[in-house]
Amino acid sequence: MAASSSSSKSSLAMIMKVATLVALILVATEVDGQSCNRHLSGLNVCGEFVVPGADKTNPSAECCSALEAVPSECLCNTIRIASRLPTRCSIPTLSCS
């Protein structure tokens, strides 16, 4: 049980590091005059729902509200940038099924 908890905390830490990195990349990206960084930082409340093996499978109302507040172009830019990171870091590309 402790190993599972440690693994979940490690996964959450990695997700938060990646989210922070992506948010920093997007600081200069603007949509409708507002920084994507501000919107994306609000998604921190969703962290506990996206960690593999998370006990909570349904996001909270707070998480859903934060997600709804992010302009779709910010989300799309984040996904595009995140998908290019492995290549730019000289590591194998991700293959999600």
Image: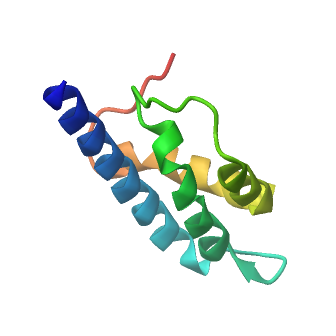
Relative to 46, is 33 above or below? below
37 vs 4, left or right, is right
Relative to 25, is 67 above or below? above
54 vs 61, left or right, is left
Tell me residue 76's x, y (percent): 69, 50
Which residue of the protein is positioned furthest toward the left in this rendering?
3
Q: Which residue corresponds to the image point at 46% horizontal and 72% vertical from the top-left? A: 24
Report the number of numbered marks: 0
Q: Quarter of the image containing the N terminus?
A: top left
Which residue of the protein is positioned furthest toward the bottom in this rendering?
33
Tell me residue 9's x, y (percent): 27, 44
Tell me residue 81's x, y (percent): 53, 54
Relative to 93, is 44 above or below? below
Tell me residue 70's x, y (percent): 74, 61
- Depth check, front residue: 55 or 75: 55
Q: Which residue corresponds to the image point at 75% horizontal and 81% vertical from the top-left? A: 34
Colour logic: rainbow
- Depth check, front residue: 15 or 75: 15
Q: Which residue corresponds to the image point at 48% horizontal and 61% vertical from the top-left? A: 22
Q: Which residue corresponds to the image point at 68% horizontal and 56% vertical from the top-left? A: 62
